[in-house]
Image (cartoon, rainbow, N blue to C red):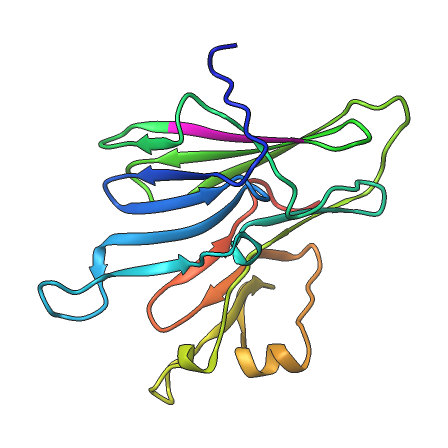
C-alpha cells in the first residue's frame, strides 16, 4: 500500500495548522510539543510563542497509552506511522487523520488515530485494539496526560492556581501540584473531564461519550 510508511526507529511528525505547531513522536505515539501561534510569552513583538507541551525526550511526551492486566504493551513501544508524509500542513477547514500502529509480540494490534483540525485547538484521539492472537484477551487501557513540572514552573503570583482540574458532580475540583505530590487524586466514572491547569491554559482529556 503506497500510504504505508513503516518506521522501526524514533521518528517525529511535524504538524502545522493556522493555530499551532505540534510535534508527535512514534515512540508511544505521543505528543512532544504544541506551540500556539496566536499567543506570546510577553508583549514584545519578537516574543516566543506559548508552548503548552514542550519536551525533547519521548518518555516525557503526553497522551501516554499503556495496556494493563492482560493487554500487554509498553507506553514507549515503537509505532509504525501510517501516513504518506512525516510533515502535515493544514489550513482553513481542513482535517486529517494521523495514524500510528503498534503490533505486540503476541499479536495485539494497537492503533492510535489522531484527528487534526486546522480550525480547532482540540486534537481528537481514537484508540482501536485488534486481537491478532489465537487466545482471548482482557485488560485495561490507561491514557494519561503527562506534565513535566519543576520549581521554575511554579506561578510567581500567589493567587494563581496550578494543578489538576476535574469536572465531577457538576463542579470543577482543583488539586494543587504540591498536594498531588503528597497523594494522587482518584475519580470514578462520574468524572466528565480532567486536565492540568496553569496560569493561562489547560490541557484537558474529554471522552467522546460519557462513561457507563
Residue 108 rendering spot, x and y as whole percentages: 76, 30
Report whether 204 appears left or right of 78. Answer: left
Q: Nearer the viewer, residue 205 or 82?
A: 82
**Magenta region, mostly helix, strand or loop?**
strand
Q: Is residue 14 visible?
A: yes
- Verify whether residue 16 appears in magenta: no
**Among all residues in the image, which is located at the extreme right?**
135
Q: Is residue 76 above or below residue 90?
A: below
Which quadrant is the C terminus positioned in? top right
Q: What residue is at 22 percent from the left and 31 percent from the top?
A: 92
Residue 207 rendering spot, x and y as whole percentages: 57, 45
**Among all residues in the image, which is located at the extreme bottom?**
158
Residue 55, by quadrant, is: bottom left
**Among all residues in the image, which is located at the extreme left?**
45
Residue 197, by quadrant, is: bottom left
Q: Is residue 36 above or below residue 117?
A: below
Count of numbered labels shown in the rendering: 0
- Verify whether residue 97 appears in magenta: yes
**Residues shaded magenta:** 96-102
**Among all residues in the image, which is located at the extreme top?**
1
Report whether 149 appears left or right of 184. Answer: left
Amino acid at each position: 500500500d503506497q500510504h504505508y510508511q513503516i518506521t522501526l526507529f524514533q521518528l517525529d511528525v511535524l504538524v502545522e495548522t493556522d493555530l499551532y505547531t505540534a510535534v508527535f513522536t512514534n515512540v508511544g505515539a505521543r505528543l512532544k510539543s504544541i506551540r500556539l501561534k496566536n499567543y506570546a510569552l510577553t508583549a514584545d513583538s519578537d516574543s516566543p510563542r506559548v508552548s503548552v507541551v514542550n519536551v525533547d525526550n519521548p518518555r516525557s511526551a503526553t497522551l501516554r497509552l499503556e495496556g494493563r492486566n492482560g493487554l500487554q504493551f509498553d507506553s514507549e513501544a515503537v509505532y509504525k506511522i501510517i501516513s504518506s508524509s512525516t510533515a502535515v500542513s493544514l489550513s482553513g477547514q481542513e482535517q486529517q487523520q494521523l495514524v500510528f500502529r503498534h503490533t505486540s509480540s503476541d499479536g495485539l494490534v494497537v492503533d492510535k488515530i489522531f484527528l487534526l483540525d486546522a480550525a480547532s485547538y482540540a486534537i481528537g484521539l481514537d484508540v482501536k485494539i485488534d486481537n491478532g492472537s489465537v487466545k482471548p484477551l482482557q485488560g485495561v487501557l490507561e491514557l494519561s496526560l503527562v506534565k513535566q513540572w519543576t520549581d521554575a514552573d511554579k506561578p510567581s503570583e500567589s493567587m494563581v492556581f496550578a494543578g489538576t482540574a476535574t469536572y465531577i458532580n457538576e463542579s470543577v475540583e482543583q488539586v494543587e501540584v504540591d498536594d498531588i505530590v503528597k497523594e494522587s487524586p482518584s475519580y470514578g466514572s462520574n468524572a466528565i473531564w480532567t486536565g492540568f491547569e496553569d496560569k493561562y491554559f489547560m490541557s484537558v482529556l474529554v471522552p467522546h461519550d460519557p462513561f457507563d
